[in-house]
Amino acid sequence: IPDDHPFVQQQVKKAMDAFVSGKAMYVAPHGSHRLFRYGDKFEGAYFLVKGTDEAPIIIYFVRYSRVKIKKGLLNTKNALRQVLVWRRKDLSIGAQSVAKCVFFNYLLPEFGALVTDTQQTERGKAFWDYAIAQALEKELVVSVINTKRQASQVVRSTEEFENLDTSIW
C-alpha cells in the first residue's frame, strides 16, 4: 500500500496521536529506533519511531485485532489477525527484522496464534512466506485453515507449504 493511501495515513496519524499524547507504551529499542504499542488485547498496533520525541517519524507499524477461532481448528480459541503491516518505503529499516521481532517476540506469545486471510498484496504474501518459514525454523506449529469447510491442516515443512502456496493465495 502506498505511503499516501488514506488508510495508511489514518493509521499513521492514530499512532502519532498515541505517541504524542503519551498513550503509547514504550516496548523496546530496535536498533537506533524505538518500538511502541497502543491498544489492548482486542485491537491496537505496534509501531517503530525514528528520531527524537520533538521530531518523531513513524516508519513501521502493524495493526492487529483479536479473532475467535472455532474450537478444534487450532490449539487456542483466540488468535491475532494482522490488519495491516506497513513501513515507509523511503527509509531502509530492515522491515523483515522489525516484523520478525514484533510477531515472534510480542504478538505470538500474547495471542498464541497469528492468522491471515487470502487477501494479500504480493509483498504481503512474501511477508507471510517469510514468517511461516521462520515459524517452521523455530519448530512452531503452522496450520492452514479453510474457514468455509471448517478444516485445518498442519504444515510440517517449507516444502509442504510451498506445495500449498498457490492454492491458499
Image: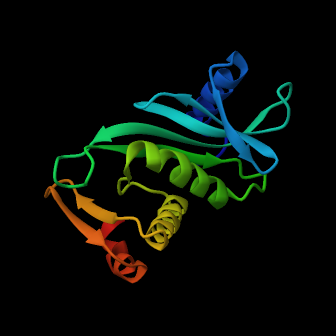
Q: How many marks?
A: 0
Residue 10: x and y in percent read 59, 29
Name the foreground residue: 82 vs 139. Answer: 139
Name the foreground residue: 9 vs 135. Answer: 135
- Vertical arrangement, residue 136 with respect to residue 56, above or below: below
Q: Say which residue appears at 47% left-offset and 28% top-offset.
A: 40
Residue 148: x and y in percent read 16, 54
Give the quadrant of residue 33: top right
Residue 21: x and y in percent read 69, 16
- Vertical arrangement, residue 84 with respect to residue 159, above or below: above
Q: Say which residue appears at 47% left-offset and 62% top-offset.
A: 128
Name the foreground residue: 80 vs 129. Answer: 80
- Vertical arrangement, residue 42 with respect to residue 90, above or below: above
Give the quadrant of residue 142: bottom left
Specify whether 26 is left or right of 132.
right
Specify whether 147 is left or right of 157.
left
Specify whether 75 is left or right of 119.
left
| Colour approach in the figure | rainbow
